[in-house]
Image (cartoon, rainbow, N blue to C red):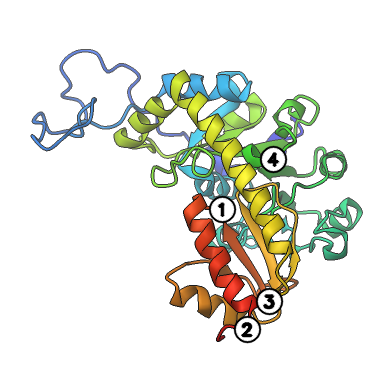
Amino acid sequence: MSDILHLVRPQVLAMQPYLPPESEEGIRLNANESAWRSEADISIRGLNRYPDPYPETISARLARMYGVDAGQLALTRGSDEAIDLLLRLFCREGVDSIVICPPTFGMYRVYAQVQGAAVIEVPLEQDQGFGLDPGKLLAACEENTKLVFLCSPNNPTGQLLDEAAVFEVCRGLLGRAVVVVDEAYVEFADRASLIDSLEAWPNLVILRTLSKAYGLAGARLGALISSVEITDLFKRVVPPYALSTPVLEAGDALLCPAELQELEQRIKQISQLRDGMARELEGLKVVRKVWPSDANFILISVDDAAAVDAAFARAGILIRNFSREPGLENCLRITVGTPEQNAAVMAVLSEQNNGGAG
């Protein structure tokens, strides 16, 4: 048995996955769809028909963009679905556990709770810039730990995790657990994705999404990338027709060369705006600390997060107050917006800096 297969829930290995018909040629009277298309339907395919069950074109385009073979990639409804289905694939209710490194993306815990998996916390080292301590993480893993979720760049702190530390975790868990690196924000970082390391680490899974850098948050389109073995196992639990026709058509339009070239320029612009905004924030006495960011947001620490948050609310600006998260007391996360939106943010903070009402 492979180093991965024995980690999979036996129920998943035993089940017969549902396979939609491969051929769509001819008169379609096999799926109980409506034969009539609405006059309001502006899609190319037609919303009266089920979506393409095997969207090979967009899979191939994403695989090419990420530099992997198409067999290493599985399409998902954003990263959230990948997190959910990985837990269903590997974790037995009331038996298995996952490891997370708070402060981090909250949905790892949520989906673990839904699946009935225990959650082991190994906090990031705040005094080391929210760094990962691989020794502590490996020591915390139990016999039935199946998944380790690492967010890099991390949400909500914004920093990349040290590559060597991630690889040490992969090495320590070979044959024992799967290491999932969530790279939702990696396009904004100076360092490349860990995708090129997949061949070295058979227990490594990478999650990517088009929600952030590529502006498709409303579409919910992402990808799980790993070895062919893990990807094939993952596809067993992906529901049929998971991606709707409008999502597939939006993704197809986005992934053409001209659009991608424009988006690459936008990503560079956002990174430049982030760095400029960070420098401005560091000059304000109301801001106690600006955490370095490799994402499209900035985490700041202030004396009174509730008061500053209220000031933003009065100005009609929505930000996130993370004060309830351990280690993030009086911390606010601000997404990088347009130059005009960023100027509005700075105006609120400047008013607070000058003793504005809290």
In-image side of 172 versus 52 (left or right)? right
Separation of residues labelled 4 and 2 (CA atoms): 35 Å
Classed neighbour count for the residue bearing mark 2: other residues with Cα under 10 Å, few (<14), some (14–19), many (≥20): few
Mark 1 → mark 3, Cα distance in angstroms: 19 Å
Which of discs 4 and 2 lies nearer the camera? The answer is 2
**Amino acid under label 3?**
Asn
Q: Which of pointers 3 and 4 lies earlier in the amino acid sequence?
A: 4
Looking at this view, is 248 or 345 the one in front?
345
The amino acid type found where label 2 is placed reads Gly
Could you tell me if residue 134 is visible in this image?
yes
Q: Are marks 1 and 3 in contact (CB under 8 Å)?
A: no
| Res. 66 image quadrant | top right
Sooner in the amino-acid sequence: mark 1 or mark 3: 3
Q: Disc count in the image?
A: 4
Ranked by sequence position, the earlier of labels 4 and 2 is 4
Q: Residue at x 33, y 29 (%)?
A: 249
| Element class at badge 4 | loop
- Residue pointed to by mark 1: 336
Which residue has dot 4 on it? 189
The quadrant where residue 326 appears: bottom right
Q: Is residue 205 left or right of residue 88?
A: right
Q: Dot 4, how many residues are within 10 Å of its Cα: few (below 14), some (14-19), or many (20+)?
A: many
Residue on which the image places disc 2: 355
Q: Are marks 4 and 1 in contact (CB under 8 Å)?
A: no
Q: Which residue is mark 3?
A: 330
Residue 200's place in the image compared with 220, above or below, is above
